[in-house]
Amino acid sequence: MKQVSTLLCFLLLISFLNAQDIEVASVPTAVMDEFMLRYPDAKSTSWQMVPGQEKYRADFKNNKMATTAILSADGHLVETETQIRTCALPEPALHFLAEKYTDKKIEMASIMEDESGTITFEAVIEQVDFTFDSTGQVMSTNEVVFAGGRNR
């Protein structure tokens, strides 16, 4: 489970690899206000700032699920990603993965919502990240690569 959580955090923000940890006191009031409004029960929150983008990333537990929220400096919610149980993936996605990887287990699943409200799902099997739309249709596949090269 610890590996799944680590993998989830990495996948969530691969584009934010240069993020810098910051203290809560450094988070703008507008960002904190919006975060607290949306996630009043958040636990174990850690904050990072994405250099050059003026975005703030909060990693936290929400209802016991690993969650990441990206907010702009003015407090606008840009994106969220929440770890989910694999059985919560849309049925067509589960069917697709079961056919493609008959004897493999889904290592990680998450649901994402962007600022326009578009919902997508991700699933990882054997270092391949599958993105599905809200109906479970495949949108893209990507090999999971870690900072030091391919993950083996």
Image (cartoon, rainbow, N blue to C red):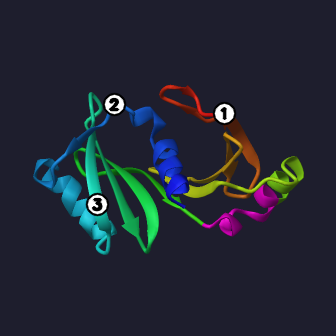
Question: Viewed as shown, does residue 128 lie left or right of 77?
Answer: right
Q: Residue 106: horizontal and vertical position, in percent?
A: 71, 55
Residue 100 visible in this rendered orientation of the protein: yes
Q: Residue 129: horizontal and vertical position, in percent?
A: 66, 42
Which amino acid is tagged 1?
Answer: Glu
Which residue has dot 1 on it?
A: 143
For the N terminus, the image quarter is bottom right
Identity of the residue drawn at 27% across and 54% down = 46
Asked if residue 108 is positioned above or below residue 72 in the image, the reply reads below
Residue 116 visible in this rendered orientation of the protein: no
Q: Is residue 140 magenta?
A: no
Q: What's the CA distance linking mark 3 and mark 1?
A: 29 Å
Q: Is residue 92 magenta?
A: yes
Q: Residue 147: horizontal and vertical position, in percent?
A: 48, 28
Which residue has dot 3 on it?
A: 45
The quarter holding residue 60 reads bottom left
Which amino acid is tagged 3?
Answer: Thr
The magenta segment is 85-94
Mark 1 or mark 3, which is nearer the start of the sequence? 3
Identity of the residue drawn at 22% across and 47% down = 74
Judged from the image, the secondary structure of the residue bearing numbered disc 3 is: strand
Which amino acid is tagged 2?
Answer: Asn
Q: What's the CA distance linking mark 2 and mark 1?
A: 20 Å
Identity of the residue drawn at 52% across and 43% down = 11
Asked if residue 147 is positioned above or below residue 84 in the image, the reply reads above
Q: What's the CA distance linking mark 2 and mark 3?
A: 19 Å
